[in-house]
Amino acid sequence: DILLKQLTEDVRQAKSIPQVFDYLETRDSKNITFDIVLAGSAWTALAHLSKHSTLGDTDQRGLESLIKDTKAALADSDRSWANTGSPHPLEKLPGDPAANIIWAVAIIQAKAPLVKTLTSRLVRAASRRIRFMHAQNTANATWGLALMEYQSHAFCLDATKHMTSLSPKLPNSSACLSLPQMACALAVLGFRSDEYMKAVAQRCSSLLPELNNRNLCALAWSLAEFYPDADRYNGVWRGRGTVNGARIMWITGVAT
């Protein structure tokens, strides 16, 4: 456990993409088991580093190995969940690994499309953990799906219910970031939840001066997408959804 914690911290602090893979390769010689928490640290480190670096040809082998190991770690987590009905204690850390990996994969996939092969497995893992997630984890995971344009009605339904319940209890700083971010992600995904948007409006109405420009724009844009001004073609289809140009956005739970 001590070696695993040290390796996880080393990976998190890596200064380059090759260094992440170099650290991960040392685990075999130290008999360190690759788990979902280490996977979360590795993917998060790669996402941050990839914003300023290019994934080279020499990184491809390391990336393929990481994808394989992450799938195995998710399978191990699935078995643990099946036996206990809850995630391993380490998986209840504030930075939920499944949520972090979804966000990281979304950032990396523009440069390495292969990573999208993990998405469906990650969404299932995140859905099981949703009630343990902090608000920002939930928003990050939903934003990751939006970046990949990955539709998951079940995840969005669970995520909006979870965030609606968390909304009144969030510190102002968290509410200003996570609530608009998730509203924007839902609008990109075409998933409208009136219950969630009502909770956002109630929580953020008094926080508007505290929203930065990006989050204010995200909130304004999502409201315009969900509730367009009515004219001959656009508007709210009562009890069904929203018509906005050539786009129809169904209300939560309404089948297409």
Image (tube, grey):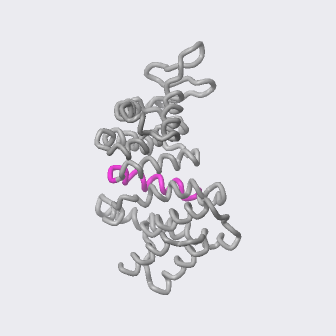
Question: Looking at this rendering, what residue extends furthest in the top direction?
Answer: 232
Is 19 placed above or below 40 here? below
Is 255 placed above or below 127 here? above
Question: Looking at this rendering, what residue extends furthest in the right direction?
Answer: 57
Please state the horizontal and vertical placement of residue 238, each as a whole percent of the image.
45, 19
Quarter location, residue 114: bottom right
Please name whichever residue, 133 or 117, is drawn nearer the observer in this view of the structure: 133
Please state the horizontal and vertical placement of residue 88, each as a whole percent of the image.
33, 65
Quarter location, residue 239: top left
- Total labels drawn: 0
Left or right: 255, with 234 as reference point: left
Please name whichever residue, 102 or 176, is drawn nearer the observer in this view of the structure: 176
Q: Is residue 106 magenta?
A: no
Q: Please report the residue visible at 55 percent of the width from the left and 73 percent of the height from the top.
A: 20
Question: Looking at this rendering, what residue extends furthest in the bottom direction?
Answer: 29
Is 166 placed above or below 21 here? above
Q: Please report the residue visible at 66 percent of the width from the left and 69 percent of the height from the top.
A: 60
Left or right: 231, with 1 as reference point: right
What quarter of the picture does the N terminus occupy?
A: bottom left
The span picked out in magenta is: 116-132
Please state the horizontal and vertical placement of residue 12, each as a whole percent of the image.
48, 69
